Amino acid sequence: MTAILRTNHLTKRYNNRAVVNDLSMTIHEGDIYGFIGKNGAGKTTTFRMLCGLLAPSGGEIEVVGWDLREAKAEVRAEIGYVAQKFSLYDKLTVEQNLRYFGRSYGFWGPRLTRRVAEAMRGYGLSAYRRMPAKSLPVGAKRDLSIACALLHHPKILFLDEATSGADLASRRAFWRSLTKLAAAGTTIVVTTHFMEEAEYCDRFLIQDAGRILALGSPGEVRAFAAKDAPGRTIRSIEDAFIAIVEAARAARKKEAAS
């Protein structure tokens, strides 16, 4: 399998406190890879470093064969990014937003028109084409954000809490669309605080206090939690998450007391 993203001993410190501590991982082409954790766990900081939005304190990041420290422009040409909060232009229409982002990716003339038409058709936005972005329903805003992020056909798509505020039916529909994208070869990296969404990921990691506590497929993480907490029933990712985090915090407390 082709490696799309690698990190090696990635670290981020603020005031001598490690927010992300010694993160090493590999993400492959077509993977759906999740970061699971509560607020303050370090997942958003990690995510922003992987996107090139935040400089690490130490370690290495390689995206699509490029060292992020040395080739930020080349890396950014290969990634799409969707922020947690709607970050497009409220006063521009759907079509105007798409055309603006298309031009920022270097598309002009018939090529731009074709990409915009494909995006509106592919994401069900044609009926909204003349509507200002601020007037769109929540689901359509999210679809527009993703359509803009994918206009240049990036190899990797970063989604930060993309289902926050969505109802269950919308979240399930959204994940079905992500599965189709991944099947077509786009690598997807997503943060979420909805534990059940980890079931849609090929692999995911659980972070707490900046450290990786578990990394693997949903089945592997549940098995790890069951081994780490003998006698405890592990039926879901949420059960696994609670068991793993509690065990890690107890170990840290014991270490600090010794």
Image: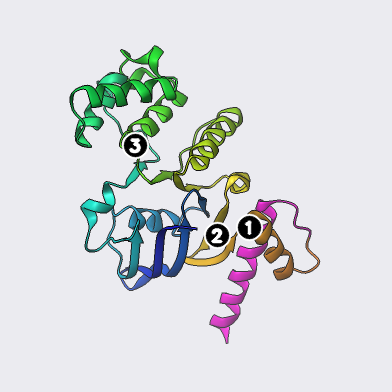
Task: Please state which amino acid type lies under the numbered disc 2.
Answer: Ile
- Indicate which disc residue 149 carries: 3
Q: Could you tell me how far apart the alpha carbons at marks 2 and 1 are, in whole angstroms?
A: 7 Å
Q: Are marks 3 and 1 in contact (CB under 8 Å)?
A: no
Residue at the spot x=81%, y=66% of the render? 231
| Secondary structure under the numbered disc 3 in the rendered image | helix
Q: Classify mark 2: residues with Cα within 10 Å, few (<14), some (14-19) or many (20+).
A: many
Residue 54 in the image, given as x and y percentages of width and height: 29, 57
- Indicate which disc residue 252 carries: none
In the picture, residue 136 is in which quadrant? top left
Q: Which range of residues does the magenta coloring cover?
A: 233-258
256 vs 114: above or below:
below
Residue at the spot x=71%, y=63% of the render? 223
Label 3 or label 1, whichever lies nearer to me, is 3
Q: Which residue is mark 2?
A: 206
Circle nearer the N terminus (2, 1): 2
Task: Please state which amino acid type lies under the numbered disc 1.
Answer: Phe
Residue at the spot x=33%, y=20% of the render? 117
